[in-house]
Amino acid sequence: MPKIHVNDIDLYYETAGQGQPVLLIHGLGSSTRDWEYQTPAFSTRYRVVALDVRGHGQSDKPPGPYSIPLFTADTAELIRSLEIGSSHVVGISMGGMIAFQLAIDKPDLVQSLVIVNSGPELIVRSLRDRFNVLQRSLLVRIFGMRKIGEFLGSRLFPKPEQEPLRHMFIERWAENDRRAYLEAFQGLLGWSVLDHLHTIMCPTLVVASDEDYTSVSTKEAFLEKLPRAELVVIEDARHAVTAERPEDFNKVVLDFLANQT
């Protein structure tokens, strides 16, 4: 279980394969296990590095506040400490937010970007947005992590045949530290790099599920601000596309990476 000391904490990471580096950054409330269907496929061609973000998985969970810039600083230090060099950075959900911030703050560390069911800001604007934030916070505070896992799992994997995925998600979600999760969740709210997207000059792939929380049109809107970006939509998929449609997702990403090397 390798860990590396950065910014006064120990970050857990995993590595596999040889070749150009591919850095995998998971979503909120998850861990390196987000990528169990990707690492074996990607590591046949690339050096895959996956980390547990501060407050998640097997990494340290110090008191907050947490933020996307803080998660990004940790990630940059991990890249430097492991001497990975400029990497292809793949981030899902919160991990995509970190990837955006990394490409803006430390462009020398990013060779290309893959943004998966994510976006360049998380601003609470509408009453519905406020309700969703309050609902999630209350679920965690009152009922704990397992209950929110059940709540989210039924939406991420709604089909009867997806019961094994749903069960796995709930069990893993229940392992989250409640305080650290809430610190991370609060740290996402109000973040935005929308006005800085024009500075991201590396090739960028935006992967969108057609049934994600946010619409494809939302992704198309910010795509126009990225100088070298393309969009691929995966049909009949929800937010956790890496687990729900791994073969389709892997092909899309590997085809993109092959054109960058």
Image: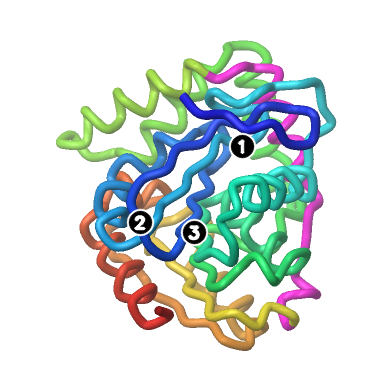
Q: Is residue 220 left or right of residue 154?
A: right
Is residue 139 in view from this perspective? yes
Disc 1 element: loop
Q: Report the Cα–Cα distance between label 2 and label 3.
A: 17 Å
The residue carrying pointer 1 sits among few (fewer than 14), some (14 to 19) or many (20 or more) residues within 10 Å by Cα, namely: many
Q: Residue at x 36, y 32 (%)?
A: 154
Foreground residue among 208 and 109? 109
Residue 253: quarter of image: bottom left
Residue receiving disc 2: 18
Q: Amino acid at mark 2?
A: Gln
Residue range highlighted in magenta: 176-198
Query: Of callouts 3 and 1, which one flags the residue occurring earlier in the amino acid sequence?
Result: 1
Q: Is residue 208 left or right of residue 141?
A: left
Residue 186: x %, y % from top left: 76, 35
Residue 237 in magenta? no
Q: Report the Cα–Cα distance between label 3 and label 1.
A: 14 Å
Residue receiving disc 1: 53
The residue carrying pointer 3 sits among few (fewer than 14), some (14 to 19) or many (20 or more) residues within 10 Å by Cα, namely: many
Q: Amino acid at mark 1?
A: Val
Residue receiving disc 3: 90
Residue 189: x %, y % from top left: 76, 45
Q: Is residue 107 left or right of residue 146?
A: right
Whether label 2 touches label 3, CB < 8 Å: no
Query: Of callouts 2 and 3, which one flags the residue occurring earlier in the amino acid sequence?
Result: 2
Residue 126: x %, y % from top left: 74, 53
Q: Residue at x 47, y 82 (%)?
A: 230
